[in-house]
Image (cartoon, coloured by chain):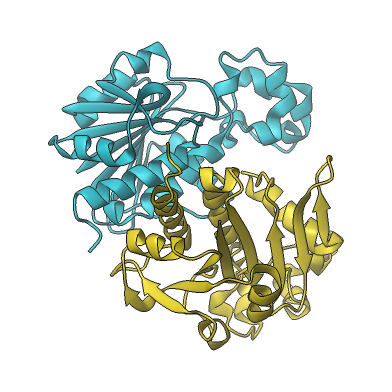
Chain colours: A cyan, B yellow
Amino acid sequence: MLNLVIAETALETVPEEIFKHTSLKKIRNNGKKPTDLLLDRTLHHFAILSGNLEQDYKRARPDISHIILLSALATPLFKKNQLKVFIHTINDQFIKIGDNLRIPKSYTRYEGLILDVIKNKKIISNDGQSLLEFSENLTFLELLQKHIKPDIVIGFSTNGISKTFENISKELSSFNNPCAVIGGFPKGHFSPQIESHLTKKYSISSSSLEAHVVVSRLLYEYEKTNNFLI
Amino acid sequence: MLNLVIAETALETVPEEIFKHTSLKKIRNNGKKPTDLLLDRTLHHFAILSGNLEQDYKRARPDISHIILLSALATPLFKKNQLKVFIHTINDQFIKIGDNLRIPKSYTRYEGLILDVIKNKKIISNDGQSLLEFSENLTFLELLQKHIKPDIVIGFSTNGISKTFENISKELSSFNNPCAVIGGFPKGHFSPQIESHLTKKYSISSSSLEAHVVVSRLLYEYEKTNNFLI
């Protein structure tokens, strides 16, 4: 069993102060509320620029979590219930991915699903299984302590110690309840709040790799280490 | 150098006979033309159902090519110009991906880019490099003969001979100009027109894997075989 946390993920509804910006007038006039939209640099660029958002370079990229989930949830590891996936957001919100979630391929449907769970806190399948759960005000540490209880926490960062995916997978596999942590943001590094709870921090390439590439390669090597690909 | 062909890709503008369907009335009234939209099951489901499209189960999934390209073009292999990517579509259209293309993360922008190249045949960067090229009526065989000239063509299919990514990568790497072929469609198998030009056909898993997972794993192993990850 492997736990994967996507940390400080650039995923949030539009903050009130951004929603008021003149460039979003048309959206307001359409009757939309800030909670009806995910903050997205593609659409809200000017409002973000003038909005004085803290750490704005780490935010407004909901597509990043979508492609990480598309990559992770399509693996045999996830399909055989050997991978638990958790999203921790830049605002300390938390989304738990259920074992049987089929993530929508369409971004529009993904956005709808995320907005739905933020609003209703839980999405249950027709046969009663939890597909998504949402909670607020959960720090990274609380996520680890309450939901995972890992015996090792390995983070991926360009400023970590150089190590191959193969060797990282072997190290993770030598623990009972290992946890891998990858940043769900476009630029920058983990904040000290995350850093301080990483047992180890590894870099897997001299050039920086997008998060979904790191996740794809890690899960593949983890499957190989554990003889999953037969 | 590795060539990757995404074959019989579910990527096309809306066929005229689909565009006439009553369920697309609103789109027509908005002044859209069939060439302004990619055929998409998410949006045109009812029109497709009643449209008598040939092989409709293999069509109308433009998101598949998007996520394959997101996976392939984010690899060090592509970034160091050691991977050439070609899209062959279900209608024998052909899109050549330029070495310096940065594929839009946003699906909406991806759709806009593809519609643009279908209309204008070529997209050139500000500094004069070809980013995308489009041509019509190019069979898979012609694509191989005119644009790639491979010395081996390996296709991925659940009905191929079982072999690991590692061994397939070694085999590909033993040739000068190898070509890997993956289906860009949601269901079914390669048509005989594709099958007959595959030198080898391999299966890499007992369960079927989505195309982007196969591409991610293959390119990673190919990098490993060729000592790319230093």
Q: Quadrant of residue A97?
A: top left
Q: Where does residue B107 sit, x and y in percent of width and height?
A: 63, 50
Q: In this view, does B192 lie to the left or right of A215?
A: right
Q: Where does residue B214 sit, x and y in percent of width and height?
A: 42, 60
Q: In which quarter of the image is the C terminus of chain B?
A: top left
Q: Where does residue A190 sit, x and y in percent of width and height?
A: 43, 19
Q: Quadrant of residue B184?
A: bottom right
- Can residue B180 be seen in the rendering of this structure? yes
Q: Quadrant of the N terminus of chain B?
A: bottom right
Q: Is residue A22 left or right of residue B195?
A: right
Q: Is residue B222 left or right of residue B183?
A: left
Q: How many marks?
A: 0
Viewer-side residue, B134 vs B114: B134
Which residue is drawn at the image coordinates 31% and 63% (left, top)?
B164
A65 lies above or below B161: above
Which residue is drawn at the image coordinates 31% and 13% (left, top)?
A196
Q: Where does residue B143 sit, x and y in percent of width and height?
A: 67, 74
Which residue is drawn at the image coordinates 70% and 47% (left, top)?
B109
Which residue is drawn at the image coordinates 79% and 47% (left, top)?
B129
Viewer-side residue, B164 vs A214: B164
- Can residue A98 be seen in the rendering of this structure? no
Viewer-side residue, A175 vs A168: A168
